[in-house]
Image: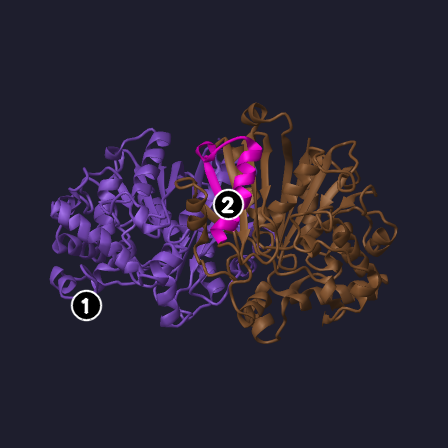
Chain colours: A purple, B brown
Amino acid sequence: MRKVAVVGVGQSVFGVRNDVTLQELAWEAVKEALEDAGISQKDVELSVVGTVGTRGYELMPSVVVNEYCGLVGKGPVRVEAACATGSAALWTAYTAVASGQVDVALAIGVEKMNEVDTATSLAVGGRAGNYLWEFHFYGTTFPAYYAFYATAHMAKFGTTEEHMAMVAVKNHKYAARNPKAHFQYEVTIEEVLTSRPIAWPIKLLDSSPISDGAAAVVLASDEVARRLTDTPVWIKAIGYSSDTSNFTRRLDYLGLRATRQAAEMAYKIAKISPGDVEVAEVHDCFTIAEIMAYEDLGFVEKGKGGLFIAEGQSELGGKVSVNLSGGLKAKGHPLGATGLAMIYELTKQLREERERGRQAPLRKYIGLAHNVGGTGHYAYVTVLTR
Amino acid sequence: MRKVAVVGVGQSVFGVRNDVTLQELAWEAVKEALEDAGISQKDVELSVVGTVGTRGYELMPSVVVNEYCGLVGKGPVRVEAACATGSAALWTAYTAVASGQVDVALAIGVEKMNEVDTATSLAVGGRAGNYLWEFHFYGTTFPAYYAFYATAHMAKFGTTEEHMAMVAVKNHKYAARNPKAHFQYEVTIEEVLTSRPIAWPIKLLDSSPISDGAAAVVLASDEVARRLTDTPVWIKAIGYSSDTSNFTRRLDYLGLRATRQAAEMAYKIAKISPGDVEVAEVHDCFTIAEIMAYEDLGFVEKGKGGLFIAEGQSELGGKVSVNLSGGLKAKGHPLGATGLAMIYELTKQLREERERGRQAPLRKYIGLAHNVGGTGHYAYVTVLTR
């Protein structure tokens, strides 16, 4: 397999974006990525569009997006992997370049989540698992799934609501410094703990928002990358896995097996261990998810995730600087874009383009993106290096 | 890029399948494909699920399908490319094997189209193009798009309604011999010409049906393929292209540019010319589409498609044996499955497994699958050889 590098990245402002259509939103990210790479549309040989699309009105969005962005003829496919759709787009584009089919590929992730009414979106949000058994019969909506994990983790390991709140506080702190974030303000532990319960113990401020947004990543083969840039960011590995649809068939609710398997695959291919990772973007769709991610990715042993954040190990400059973008919680979570927005942040970090207060200290220049679909229905772990 | 072969194929019965859920339907095809390849789920390293999904109730279908088929952990992605979704799944799986990431991949295409009410499905059917401009403002539904092509082709080249009817008659003749086809009966020219108009000149019997169905293809690398089977069917090339979403931005309505570009790419990579193709499955979503396909694929010059079928050149044993499965028109068109069902038929043909009256005569053993999304929004052309 050929080596593949990230040579350009772009991201739109995340938030409620009723000012643009889906395709205009995508262009915000694509334009920046093309300029960052120093190329134009004619240099792009393949366009992969990732979008879940169930909360927008455009049912076959990838053709519309490609047309608006000047990429007619380049697009074979649109991909979807629930909340890991962005990583699915990255993996598909990466695989095409690695195979030798194309030298330059563009992965676009875009999502409009505010185009349908609340009732519909609630129904959609509940369908992250097996429709018949879990939604239709038992009324489980998405926060309830993660509440299962939170209560199990609290019962077995003594993780507390305060630990969870710390994740929100940390991520809001970094988002407040990120002009592209959905929420650009800080929150306090008190505010998180007294926020409205959604599915106990998950409260409003434990939950990532419903965001519109787009992100785009230009990938190039070894040879082309070296021509285009002095700072290629190499994709060392993309590990992936998936788990059962039926929630009752999971082994336990203490962590995500799909994350562990994807991470194991990625570490093996990249020939690194968890301790080598210096900066990471992890999937904090709910605060408990970040705590479990520390464990499932091997940053700390199972059960010690609450302690990890309480000791500041995941702050900027800690053992691993986690979610310096603000994470899903505060930067936002437009389903199709999130996985690629992680690559956006990590690329900026590894190129050392962030200003003081946002830049992770690096020695090995190893970054990791962790992107989950549903409640571990899909997981992708991407290792990036300079 | 490594060589990749088809080592196993499966297909469900196409039709109105209210007897099964989406995942059970997928299993019908997957089971046959695994048995045909002589492997089990544990040998599959990657599962790609293609489904459009807009007419079914399962909004994140790929995880449910993978679980039911015993493929938990193998699935990174679900793909969509409108009616070319099956080819998108093939391309994605092919690319992963060609790149060296995996040695054995499974592409599954499945669609349930009868799970929503008519009003909704009409609305969905109209959204093959740019939603705002074409559907919301002008009320164009899918048959109307192809009616534009039919009237233009008739006006410029003298193609007739009889020419179009011949396509339906031919394809029903072959579907009547196909126990997996949606319609297993013949029709006459008279019956087609007097069938109810849908969007003139397109009549009911010019139109492919709304079908449920699934198809699955097992791909393997060179080395593994040779261990598994004496009759690997090699994927020599997959060409692809796409066109504008906005219908008014097309160059003309006389053919599909995306098909021509995809075919050119495929012929170039496979180092063959159109005259080398002996057996083909083309995208006859409407009868006019098959006539244009003869031209866009280079089997006959532009404008002579009507003459081609009138002279019997696309019958079994003609210049190119086209749609011996019955085509979309009579075999059926479950959106996500169609592209893979084409591979199913071509694999059986190239292995010479079909009985008399269904088997194309072969000397060069070169087959071609032509799969379109929307009205040329996407096109994939796959060349297969023995």
Work out whether residue B50 or residue A56 is closer to the camera in this orientation and state it.
B50
- Residue ranking furthest to the bottom: B137
> Dot 2: what SS?
helix
Q: Is residue B219 magenta?
A: no
The structure residue drawn at horizontal position 49% and vertical position 35%, both measured from the top left corner, is A98
Instruction: Give the percent coordinates (x, y) of residue B51.
Output: 52, 53
Q: How many discs mark residues in the rendered view?
A: 2
Label 2 is placed on what type of residue? Trp
The quarter of the displayed image where residue A161 is located:
bottom left
Instruction: Give the percent coordinates (x, y) of residue A334.
Output: 37, 59
Up/down of A177 relative to A254, above or below: below
The structure residue drawn at horizontal position 27% and vertical position 37%, both measured from the top left corner, is A277
Work out whether residue A282 or residue B199 is closer to the camera in this orientation and state it.
B199
> Dot 1: what SS?
loop
Q: Which residues are magenta?
A: B22-50
Dot 2 and dot 1 residues touching (CB under 8 Å):
no
Residue A103 seen by the camera: no
Instruction: Give the percent coordinates (x, y) of residue B175.
Output: 72, 50
Check residue B74 in the rendering and tell me which mark sits there, or answer none.
none
> In which chain is the residue bearing label 2?
B
Work out whether residue A235 or residue B74 is closer to the camera in this orientation and state it.
B74
Few, some or many residues within 10 Å of mark 1 (<14, 14–19, 20+): some
3D distance between C-alphas at marks 2 and 1: 44 Å
Query: Mainly helix, strand or loop, the magenta region?
Result: helix
Q: Nearer the viewer, mark 2 or mark 1?
A: 2
Residue under circle 1? Answer: A196
- Are labels 2 and 1 assigned to the same chain? no
Few, some or many residues within 10 Å of mark 2 (<14, 14–19, 20+): many
- Residue ranking furthest to the front: B19
> In which chain is the residue bearing label 1?
A
Label 1 is placed on what type of residue? Arg
Residue under circle 2? Answer: B27
